[in-house]
Image (spheres, coloured by chain):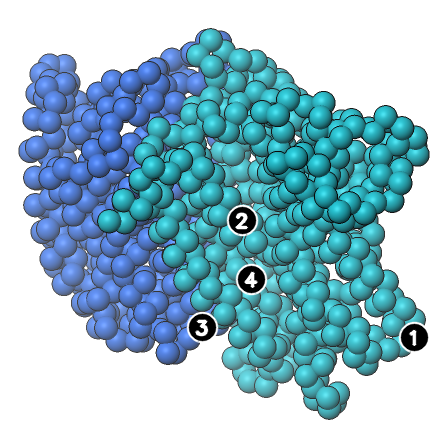
Chain colours: A cyan, B blue
Amino acid sequence: MLVGLFEGLDAVLLARIQFAFTVSFHFIFPAFTIGLASYLAVLNGLYLRTHDSKYLNLFKFWVKIFAITFAMGVVSGITMSYQFGTNWSVFSDKAGPVIGPLMAYEVLTAFFLEAGFLGIMLFGRSRVGPGLHMFACIMVAFGTALSATWILSVNSWMHTPTGYAIAENGQFVPVDWLEIMFNPSFPYRLAHTLTAAYLTTAFIVGGVGAWHLLRDHDHDRIHQGTRTMFSMAMWMAAIVAPLQIVLGDLHGLNTLEHQPQKVMAMEGHYESHPDGAPLYLFGIPNEEKQRLDYAIGIPKASSLILKHDLNAPLDGLDTIPVADRPPVAILFWSFRIMVGIGFLMLFVGLWSLWARYRRTLYTNRWLHRAALIMGPSGLVAVLAGWITTEVGRQPYTVWGLLRTSESASPLDAPAVGTSLLAFIIVYFFVFGAGVFYILRLMRAGPHVYEGGLAELADGPIRTAGITPAQQSQAKDKKEEG
Amino acid sequence: MEIVPWLAYSWAFLLALAVFIYVVLDGFDLGLGILYPFFPDRRDRDLLMNTVAPVWDGNETWLVLGGGGLFAAFPMAYGIVMPALYAPIIAMLLALVFRGVAFEYRWRTERWLKYWDWAFIGGSVVAAFSQGIALGALVQGIEVADRAYAGGWWDWLSPFSLLCGVAVIVGYALLGATWLIMKTDGPVQDRARKLAWIFGIATVLCIGAVSLITPFLDSVYYYRWFEMPGLLISAPVPMAVAIILFLLFRSLRVHHHEYRPFILSLILFALCFVGLGISIFPDLIPPDVTILDAATPYNSQIFMFVGAVVLLPLILGYTAYAYWVFRGKTDPDEGYH
């Protein structure tokens, strides 16, 4: 009966929905953990340097959230690594010789590093010295960023393929690995995505800080870590948000050069503009008539942004064969959501600078409210950005060379449909529970540790004259005895 | 674009190694999930969980390397095997989702603790069962035409693949039990010893059944096992299995043997793996796709091979270090929770 549900549906469409669903869900977790891993390493470093327990408390607070997020990222990521084969086997066969090695390098250099040192980071504070524990924190942070580097190299190659040849059996084969890895869009995509991950984390941390500042009217009772994390997050927002807008602009120019129809769709340019294109702020894409209804635009601004010249001509989708055009409406909206959030982030960052200057950073309740509302905005922006770039690659999996419709596995619709349904149910249930636990931890906030002996064992015990390393050795002796 | 045989065979060996390391490492931590129902007490379960909490993530990464390595070095085989084993692989992935999050979630809730414990049990059993089914389906052969899978989406289901599924559950439980003998003491260790006996005997029965059926699945397997010169390589394997089983059951009787049962179980798995290799080699996907058929060109294989040869020892090094840091008996209260 369940199987009958998917009879007659298009297997490729179902596979696309399944990929979009699983990868969107997965992407949320690394987008948060990349920034959070670095934040934890910084907190641990600050604690080791200053011996100020507020940093340790913050570390202990965020590391629990990190562990849950990381676990969700791992299990949803394993699914992704097999999805290429299960649902996109023709793509895997053809593109495998080029992208397979890069993904294998991701496993060898990044995944093992994260996983190997995660255990020491979470459980090992009392078993290894503070230096090695710090090293483990850094390795986890480094691993998350390295993993992003490899996977973005793969993804960028699918957008701007270079350094390959096509063999008789239809496979892409590598000719020049450096050209493949450092393909034209890779540096822009990497910088834009990593920065997005840091911003995402900054706004989540800032949102949690703001919530606790708002909740505790009696400011004497506020855990000192709350102020610290709000302040650190706002510094990050103020510095990185403007940088991100610049990086986004550069990435857009790169896309215009290599994937012009993607930019045409993002901008809503169905028609060519021989003497300066307007920047459409609003409009409703009409796929049927291939035009933008109710368009409101700033004359010539699109040409100014994209070509740095008011009167530069700009081609529209009418120059592209219909079969090669990406869907406009999705791109038009997702791009605007991403950019809109980017500017809101910039606004909050600047506002925090002003508040800091006025010495009201911890008392300006409207700023705190804004930061709270903006808490999850990074995740929305990251997803919107991802949709923009991936939907913009359609109708291809490898830009201009391999069509999505020719990439899928030889599976029947019922098989893909049933697994899609299973993924949707399991993901919403399992990850919904995870988000619930994370929100509950966030609500509880950082503890003021009472400082019992068990807690002190984690920090340097100066009075007793025993270093933690000696202590753990003593513990080992006890265990062996 | 040339295919270089020594490189392709080296890759096949590396992949086999990655899968083997996965099977024994995630094998024992999946085994703990399979054994969970025999430890109903909350404290015991905390302890079981804590014996693997710092390392399970690294263990599971070998599965990603197995899949990723196949994709990288033999993309054609990857593109055939995954659709052919679609249902068991999707089931395994979803099971691993439940099992993986249970490690974190069970510390975060009182009310839902028992459900996440069931997620851990169910996830572990289903993942092990799916892996066994996938293995059985591969051994019994996959239909291929024109570089792609040519069968239906239920072809993997057969009495033999189900038997393999049960065998893997039982084998993982044995690994889990001997791991617990090593990592715990007191009543938990005593119970683990009893469970190791039960699952040890069950493992013997399963190995026997699978070994008896395999040579008759395909005449090629029969020849590889029972004709010269294959017999010279294959004959020592069952003999070694017999010796290891004898040593294993003897060590389970001796109470101060805490490490030996686990190590002997690992050797038992290694021998089964060699047996599997004898059956399959030089195929990658029996009966039609050989290692050389599916190999990707020299350029692709060498680029990653160099990296793998340099990085794998490093990975094994720091993985071993992580195990070393958490050596000895596990404390149920340890952690950041």
User: In which quadrant of the rendered image does the C terminus of chain A lie?
Assistant: bottom left
Q: Nearer the viewer, residue A207 or A55?
A: A207
Asked whether A449 or B111 is in front, the reply is B111
Question: Where is residue A365, by image quadrant?
Answer: bottom right
Which tag is nearer the camera, tag 4 or tag 2? 2
- Looking at marks 4 and 2 on the same chain, the residue that comes earlier in the sequence is marked by 2
Residue under the image location 37 percent in, 78 percent down = B111
**Dot 1 crowding, Cα within 10 Å, few <14, some 14–19, many 20+:** few
Residue A6, quarter of picture: top left
Residue type (three-letter) at the residue carrying disc 3:
Arg
Identify the subunit bearing mark 3.
B
Which circle's residue, 1 or 4, is located before the other in the chain? 4
Contact? badges 1 and 4 (CB < 8 Å): no
Residue contact at pointers 3 and 4, CB within 8 angstroms: no
Residue beneath disc 1? A358
In percent of width and height, residue A392 lies at: 63, 35
Q: Calculate the distance from the C-alpha at mark 2 to the C-alpha at mark 1.
A: 40 Å
| Residue carrying label 2 | A24
